């Protein structure tokens, strides 16, 4: 397993950024198995997003993602969300959504031996990163065949039309307006996952396969159930699971394994 930290100038962010990468390109030789055939196959890719107050080291530090990348032979790319929910900040000129949903995909495909097939390209995350995966997996659906969303902070359900003085105990009205813009215009915008789903349906575009999981004691359970119910009403295929758990790494470590099992069982065979 090659572990790489990459720094490059992002046009979307207008500055140098860094991301971590796990690349299963140095697999050991197994007797009776063709080393050449394995190495010549392009890698599947997963763009894995961290949660609020985290960074690009979280997944490597707190989960088995390195082992899983080896097991499933999938390249994993971990950018930093910087508490910005992976949406574009047009006023500041830092387009986080465009960066993770478009530029990072294109850049890593140029740099590493990745499959360019949509069905081999996935985006996932936890909490803030779960929302970021949903939002950008849908907004840039032409790139992604699957979305993994764990304990997702689908905040538009909570903060749309919020008024000054609003606080959820973690952040307040000023923060949410700084990140999401005018909260009275949030519903129906490209930051609203329901609106993005409806746009894809109306255009006849492919919608990525979606895997969602949330703990039954998680404070975000209600918004995860609400988005699940919306997807089911709109006949959008979703794999949704709940089990005992709170908003912590014990839950996410278990479910990133199950999510990659799901990806492996749902993707077409390599050709």
Image: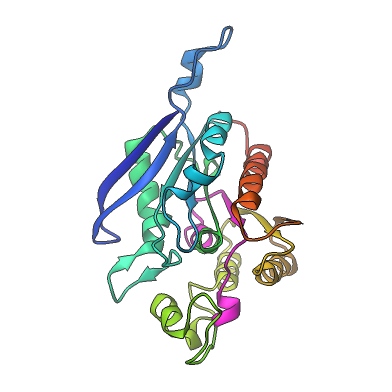
Is residue 130 among the parts visible in the rendering?
Answer: yes
Residue at 65% x, 48% y: name it.
255
Q: Position of residue 259 (x, y in %)?
A: 64, 46
Q: In the displayed structure, does residue 89 sit left or right of residue 204?
A: left
- Up the image or down, 180 lies above or below 240; here it is below
- The stretch in magenta equals 136-159
Image quadrant containing the N terminus: top left
Q: In the displayed structure, does residue 80 sit left or right of residue 129?
A: left
Q: In the displayed structure, does residue 66 sit left or right of residue 90?
A: right
Residue at 24% x, 61% y: name it.
14
Q: Position of residue 266 (x, y in %)?
A: 67, 41
Image quadrant containing the C terminus: top right
Q: Is residue 150 magenta?
A: yes
Residue at 33% x, 45% y: name it.
107
Q: Position of residue 173 (x, y in %)?
A: 46, 85
Image quadrant of residue 116? top left
Q: Is residue 227 magenta?
A: no
Q: Position of residue 175 (x, y in %)?
A: 42, 79
| Nearer to us in this view, 64 or 74 | 64
Is residue 46 among the parts visible in the rendering?
Answer: no
């Amino acid at each position: 397993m090659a572990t790489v930290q990459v720094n490059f100038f992002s046009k979307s962010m207008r500055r140098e950024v860094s991301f971590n990468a796990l690349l299963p390109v140095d697999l050991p030789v197994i007797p009776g198995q063709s080393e050449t055939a394995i190495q010549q196959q392009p890698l599947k890719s997963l763009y894995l997003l961290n949660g609020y107050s985290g960074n690009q080291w979280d997944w490597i530090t707190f989960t088995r993602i390195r082992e899983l990348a080896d097991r499933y032979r999938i390249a994993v790319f971990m950018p930093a969300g910087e508490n910005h929910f992976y949406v574009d900040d047009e006023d500041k000129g830092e387009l986080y959504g465009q960066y993770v949903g478009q530029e990072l995909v294109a850049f890593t495909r140029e740099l590493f031996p990745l499959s360019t097939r949509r069905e081999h390209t996935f985006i996932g995350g936890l909490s803030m990163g779960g929302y970021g995966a949903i939002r950008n997996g849908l907004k840039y659906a032409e790139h992604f065949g699957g979305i993994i969303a764990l304990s997702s902070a689908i905040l538009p359900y909570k903060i749309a039309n919020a008024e000054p003085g609003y606080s959820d105990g973690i952040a307040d009205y000023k923060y949410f307006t700084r990140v999401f813009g005018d909260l009275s215009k949030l519903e129906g915008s490209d930051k609203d996952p329901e609106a993005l789903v409806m746009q894809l349906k109306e255009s006849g575009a492919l919608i990525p396969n979606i895997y969602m999981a949330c703990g039954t004691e998680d404070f975000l359970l209600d918004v995860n159930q609400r988005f699940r119910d919306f997807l089911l009403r709109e006949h959008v295929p979703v794999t949704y699971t709940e089990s005992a758990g709170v908003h912590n790494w014990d839950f996410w470590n278990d479910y990133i394994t199950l999510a990659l099992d799901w990806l492996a069982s749902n993707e077409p065979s390599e050709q």
